[in-house]
């Protein structure tokens, strides 16, 4: 069974829109928090200052329920695909066992010195494989 990483989310009053729920834009920032936590804990990289980084090539999000300011939510992150130069992260904003928002992001290994995509290091692939869902 694949592992997954849970990242607690601290919401702010400013995250709430006039409809009294967390705006979709802020939900994307919650997914980014989950990505940062995942890269740091699983791959041991920050992705911020490293020569080799992970960038987002594509993302798709389904909003399945409303996130409210008082909801005690977390971001659950796992991997749905590992390729040569990219991987697909699967993330959910969860309230207990209920999925409120679900996102899939294609993430690419990118060399900022050459400004090109590059093969993911085998060490990364090995670490990611523990989080690969079938």
Image (cartoon, rainbow, N blue to C red):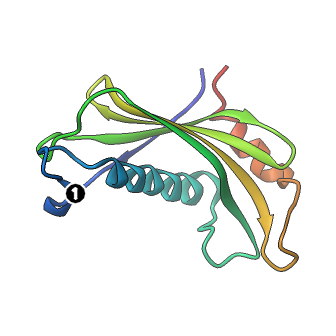
Question: Residue sitting at 22 percent across and 57 percent down?
Answer: 15
Question: Residue sitting at 24 percent across and 55 percent down?
Answer: 10
Q: Is residue 31 left or right of residue 1?
A: left
To which quarter of the image does residue 132 belong?
top right
Position in image of residue 34 (x %, y %): 46, 51
Question: Residue sitting at 19 percent across and 41 percent down?
Answer: 72
- 100 up-or-down from 74: above or below: above
Position in image of residue 119 (x %, y %): 88, 54
Question: What quarter of the picture does the N terminus occupy?
Answer: top right
Dot 1 alpha-carbon crowd within 10 angstroms: few under 14, some 14 to 19, many 20 or more: some
Question: What quarter of the picture does the C terminus occupy?
Answer: top right
Q: Is residue 117 left or right of residue 79?
A: right
Camera-side residue of 60 and 110: 60
- Name the residue tied to disc 1: 15
- 105 up-or-down from 111: above or below: above
Position in image of residue 23 (x %, y %): 27, 49
Position in image of residue 58 (x %, y %): 65, 47
């Amino acid at each position: 069974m694949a592992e997954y990483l849970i990242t607690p989310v601290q919401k702010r009053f400013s995250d709430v829109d006039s409809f009294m729920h967390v705006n979709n834009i802020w939900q994307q920032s919650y997914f980014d928090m989950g990505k940062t936590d995942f890269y740091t804990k699983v791959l041991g990289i920050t992705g911020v200052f490293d020569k080799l980084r992970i960038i987002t090539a594509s993302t798709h999000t389904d909003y399945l329920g409303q996130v409210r300011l008082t909801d005690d939510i977390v971001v659950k992150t796992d991997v749905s695909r590992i390729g040569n130069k990219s991987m697909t992260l699967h993330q959910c904003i969860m309230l207990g066992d209920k999925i409120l928002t679900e996102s899939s992001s294609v993430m690419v290994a990118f060399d900022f010195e050459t400004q090109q995509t590059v093969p993911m290091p085998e060490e990364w692939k090995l670490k990611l494989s523990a989080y690969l869902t079938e």
